[in-house]
Image (spheres, rainbow, N blue to C red):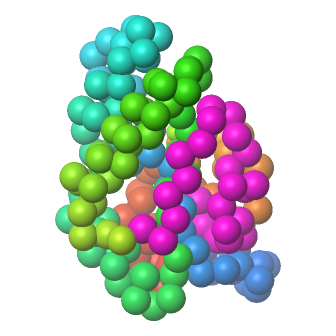
Amino acid sequence: MTNSPLHGIIKKKRKGNRTMSKAIYFDMDGTIANLYGVDGWLDMLIAKDETPYAIAKPMVRLSSLARILNRLQKKGFTIGIVSWLAKNSTNEYDERVANAKREWLAKHLKSVQFDEIHIVPYGTPKETIVNIPNGILFDDEKRNRDNWVGTAYDETNIIETLKTVA
Ligand SMILES: [Mg+2]
């Protein structure tokens, strides 16, 4: 990986951020779960149907992701999820969506024992929710990456980026 462009970027960021903590957080929708690829997802969410969260296809090779996360966790990294609920919601719908998200993780990444799972109201600043905000975040939404305290990456090249972390 020494010759990959990602390697250089991470090295540079680390140099300038010596206080970076060993934590890696993932958004779900549009980052590891292809919610927006589900036919009719928006209409279903408006109709308070949690099905799209349950049937969203993975966006990364899960076997590779699980293997890397377990290795990083053994090296002392905290592994977490920080994901928003639906935009327009009720307490009852929030509960069904949160359950669907937890079940998605249990089904697709069952070998990963997440240290933190935060499923929070839409729009909640993610850096205020996690235990270690100066860690790494993978998130498809630019404003979440911009507001993040540590180093943030989009949904592309998750596996390749993680391979350069430790
Ligand atoms: Mg997202």
Residue 36's spot in the image, x, y percent?
39, 26
Q: Establish if 33 lies above or below 66.
A: above
Residue 23, image quadrant:
bottom right
Please identify the residue farthest to the bottom as the structure is shown: 75
- Is 129 contained in the magenta span? yes
Residue 151's spot in the image, x, y percent?
67, 65
Residue 58's spot in the image, x, y percent?
27, 45
Quadrant of the snapshot with the N terminus: bottom left
In the image, the segment drawn in magenta is: 114-138
Q: Establish if 126 lies above or below 13.
A: above
Left or right: where 18 falls relative to 141 = right
Tell me which residue sits at (77%, 83%) in the image: 19
Tell me which residue sits at (59%, 59%) in the image: 137
Answer yes or no: is residue 148 visible.
no
Tell me which residue sits at (37%, 13%) in the image: 44
Residue 70, image quadrant:
bottom left
- Near-viewer residue (100 or 83): 100
Residue 10's spot in the image, x, y percent?
60, 74
Left or right: where 14 falls relative to 78 = right
Tell me which residue sits at (55%, 53%) in the image: 118
- Is 73 contained in the magenta span? no
Answer yes or no: is residue 54 visible.
yes
